[in-house]
Image (cartoon, helix red, strand yellow):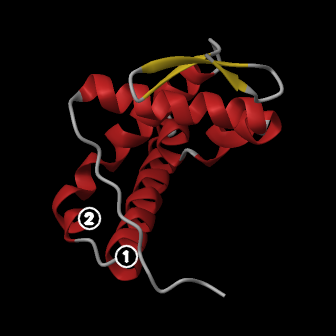
Amino acid sequence: MLSDVVVETRLGGGWREVWAHQLRWARTIRVSKFGGYMGLPITNATLWALLAAVSGHWTMAGILIAARIAMAITAGWFVLRSRDTLRLWWLVPARDLFGFAIWIAGLFGNTVVWRGMTLRLSRDGRISL
């Protein structure tokens, strides 16, 4: 059964806080589900579109970007009814590339910052001060 309640999250602060929050999630996912984490770039259509464009496959790049934006609008507007989707759809590729940068950064390091504390992640996913 699916919930009919939509959970909404807004991050406060600036880019440093957003980076730290996303990096915490990435590293936590990496230590808890390494195989799944390694597979995440496969789902990044913007990354594949960029690689297609760089290699001269412009039609494929256009198809991938169009499909990615259509998916974002479908999920954001038709499913979640977010007005931000219709206003900010053009930022989807930038968000995807930011997410890929986070993914790369998440591959390295074993610390995260949570509520101002630096915590250490062990290889088995345990958290310590």
In this view, 56 is above or below 9: above
Instruction: Report, in whole angstroms, how far the alpha carbon at label 2 lies from the one at label 1.
Output: 9 Å
Q: Which amino acid, mark 1? A: Leu
Residue 82 in the image, given as x and y percentages of width and height? 27, 71
Residue 13, percent from left and from top = 21, 33
Q: Residue at x 64, y 33 (%)?
A: 28
Residue 67 horizontal/vertical position (percent): 46, 61
Write the residue at 55% across / 36% down. 25
Asked whether disc 2 touches disc 1, contact meaning CB atoms under 8 Å apart, the reply is yes
**Local secondary structure at mark 1:** loop
Task: Classify residue 20 by image quadrant.
Answer: top left
Disc nearer the start of the sequence (2/1): 1
Residue at the disc numbered 2: 85
Classify the position of the C terminus by image quarter.
top right
Indicate the amino acid at tag 2: Thr
Can you tell which mark lies on residue 88?
A: none
Residue closest to the eye, 76 or 120: 120
- Which residue corresponds to the image point at 29% horizontal and 22% vertical from the top-left? 16
Residue at the disc numbered 1:
80
- Residue 78 vs residue 24, the one in the foreground: 24
**In-front residue for pair 121/14:** 121
> Extreme top residue here?
109
Left or right placement of residue 40 versus residue 25 in this view: right
- The residue located at (82%, 37%) in the rendering is 35
